[in-house]
Amino acid sequence: MKLGLLLGFWGADGPPPGLVAGVREAEAIGYESVWTSEGHGSDALTPLAWVGAHTSTIRLGTSVMHMAARAPAATAMAALSIDHLSEGRFVLGLGLSGPELVRGWYGQPFDPPLGRTRDYVAIVRRVLAADGPVTYVGRHLSLPVSEGSEAAGPLTSTVRPLRPDLPILLGAEGPRNVALAREIADGWIATYYSPYRDGHYRAALAEGAARPGARRADGDFEIIGAVPLILSDDTEAAADQLRPLFASFIGAAGRNFHARAFDRMGLGDVAAKVGTLWSEGSYREAAAAIPTGVVEQLALIGPPGKIRDELPAWRDSLVTTLLVYVPPRPEILRQVAELILG
């Protein structure tokens, strides 16, 4: 199991202090990859290019870039640019996000997500191949697009990719999306993953792998498991740090895929209680309604010895890279590396 560092996206104050120094330390002590995210503030690409310019071997991934934020060709252009500049270290992690962000921030339609994902990835791959003019006719996305009687001709990338088979990973939670990732992508980025409650994920991955034309063999498919990690002598205090985060995702308005993920893990009663309290504006009570035992199944928290005892479950799981979400401070990064990599 490889070790990756998740930087996430910035808070209100901008980038964390010592960002570059932290990533360089992570590279030096054995972190195999570093990943950035985006919400409706900082983007995923700019910070990744910045830290990539100050490193030389660590893989650079997006977890995840929102598909609604960029046309497929724009995403492919950014991918081939960063891959060239980093000498083949870029990993393109894509995700749908949710309807609130897609509609409210990007002004894009959300439905139907599965079909749009399939079309989007197909166009990105054709642009990256750079082996001829890109034409694609999909159910939801096509290239080129004509307006009235004015036809547009297809174009070819003016830059040849460093790697035409640059890896594309999909962030997914629902079983149909996970199956699609297994079918058309090079890997899957799991956000709410528990090694103790992953039967539904195993079934979805098996379904995708069995589809005609599935892109990767089982041993060649990456699974990136994002997990919050808090080293603390007080496990309850560590859980308290994560409860508000989990509650905010479970309680989000609209079509809530995060709450459904908890349902599929057999935690529907917890999700229902948290969601009700959150909708009433009782945010502290919603967070407090998440039992410590639930947090422990989704995160690694507590003293080093306790976390060390829990690591075998993760090593025996589907996860090929443990993507830890910790502050990029050298002392913390070293502690985590010693714990996980031994």
Image: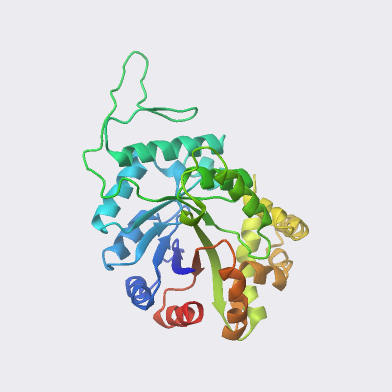
Residue name at image x 39 percent, y 36 percent: 123
Nearer to me, 102 or 163: 163
Nearer to me, 167 or 82: 167
Q: Is residue 318 above or below residue 3?
A: above
Q: Residue furthest top?
A: 149
Image coordinates of residue 124 in percent, x first then y, are 38, 40
Image coordinates of residue 181 in percent, x first then y, are 52, 46
Residue name at image x 67 percent, y 65 percent: 196
The total number of labels drawn is 0
Residue name at image x 68 percent, y 51 percent: 260
Q: Residue furthest left?
A: 158
* Quarter residue 146 falls in: top left
Residue name at image x 40 percent, y 65 percent: 34
Nearer to me, 154 or 125: 125
Confirm whether residue 108 shows in the render.
no
Image coordinates of residue 54 in percent, x first then y, are 27, 68
- In this rendering, position of residue 216 left or right of residue 245: left
